[in-house]
């Protein structure tokens, strides 16, 4: 599944990228995390505690079990702290 | 009806509230909230956001408020970038015929914004910087509206 990935805050810092396009063997957000975690220590560190992560698919909040769509924009980030 | 802006520039509360009610006689109440960078140990704060999602998320929150209360206008402004203690971060100003609706919608928008708008704060203290953790009480504040 080809995805446009975006990373924010400490997820971005641990991975060392603010975004990338990747073809992942994944059908859900959770499966994408597993596939990404295998790519290196930065990814593994960023995704080590899934309960500290939030996700948006095409700019809408989703849960880890959400189904991915080809070409979707998947953003991975910590719980928000604005306001 | 509720205008949303995401910007690096400062804003002026007086100008924003004046713009909501200027030339109108149906508005009986404008309630506003301004969030500021709290100083103390913090020397500066940088707000990161998700540009493609931020305005969309804020507009969805504003639309939800407009569906719950009879509102006559409003403005939501959230800044991003590096800010210093005392700097304004966020403004919510809501116009309605009566104060109860304006107060409630203003509080609702802030409570939803804290947990549902994609912003992240990084604080600088003593030459070090750290990401701010989300607070459970912010989730509780949002959930009281459900």
Image (tube, rainbow, N blue to C red):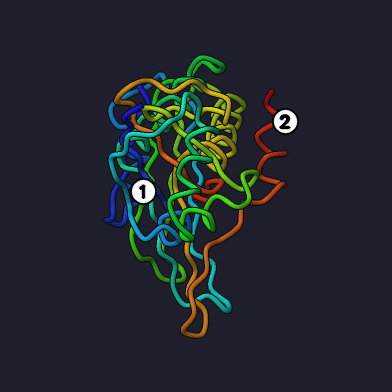
- The residue carrying mark 1 is B14
Residue at the spot x=33%, y=22% of the render? A70
Give percent across and percent down for residue B107. Answer: 59, 36
Give percent across and percent down for residue B117. Answer: 47, 39
Label 2 chain ID: B
Residue at the spot x=72%, y=39% of the render? B140
- The residue carrying mark 2 is B144
Please identify the quadrant where the N terminus of chain B is shown.
Answer: top left
Q: Which mark is residue A82?
A: none
Q: Nearer the viewer, residue B136 or A31?
A: A31
Residues indicated by labels 1 and 2 sit on the same polypeptide chain:
yes
Please identify the quadrant where the C terminus of chain B is shown.
Answer: top right
Residue at the spot x=33%, y=39% of the render? B18
Label 1 chain ID: B
Q: Is residue B129 above or below residue A6?
A: below
Give percent across and percent down for residue A59. Answer: 38, 30
Lateral position of residue A66 relative to residue B5, left or right:
right
Q: Earlier in the sequence, mark 1 or mark 2?
A: 1
Q: Is residue B121 above or below residue B111?
A: below
Q: Quick one: SS at disc 2?
A: loop
Q: Quick one: SS at disc 1?
A: helix
């Amino acid at each position: 599944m080809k995805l446009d990935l975006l990373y924010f805050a400490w997820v971005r810092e641990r991975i060392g990228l603010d975004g990338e396009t990747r073809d992942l063997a994944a059908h859900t957000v959770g499966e994408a995390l597993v596939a990404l975690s295998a790519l290196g220590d930065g990814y593994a560190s960023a995704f080590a505690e899934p309960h500290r992560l939030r996700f948006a698919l095409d700019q809408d909040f989703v849960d880890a079990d959400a189904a991915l769509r080809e070409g979707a924009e998947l953003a991975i980030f910590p719980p928000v702290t604005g306001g | 009806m509720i205008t949303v802006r995401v910007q690096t520039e400062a804003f002026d509360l007086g100008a924003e509230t004046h713009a909501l009610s200027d030339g109108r006689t149906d508005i009986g109440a404008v309630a506003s909230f301004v969030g500021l960078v709290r100083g103390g140990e913090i020397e500066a704060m940088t707000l990161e956001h998700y540009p493609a999602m931020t305005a969309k998320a804020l507009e969805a929150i504003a639309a939800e408020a407009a569906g719950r209360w009879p509102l006559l206008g409003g403005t939501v402004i959230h800044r991003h970038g590096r800010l210093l203690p005392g700097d304004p971060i966020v403004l919510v100003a809501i116009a309605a015929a009566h104060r109860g609706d304006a107060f409630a919608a203003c509080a609702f928008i802030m409570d939803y914004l804290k947990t549902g708008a994609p912003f992240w704060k990084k604080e600088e203290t003593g030459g070090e910087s750290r990401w701010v953790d989300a607070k459970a009480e912010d989730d509780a504040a949002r959930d009281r509206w459900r």
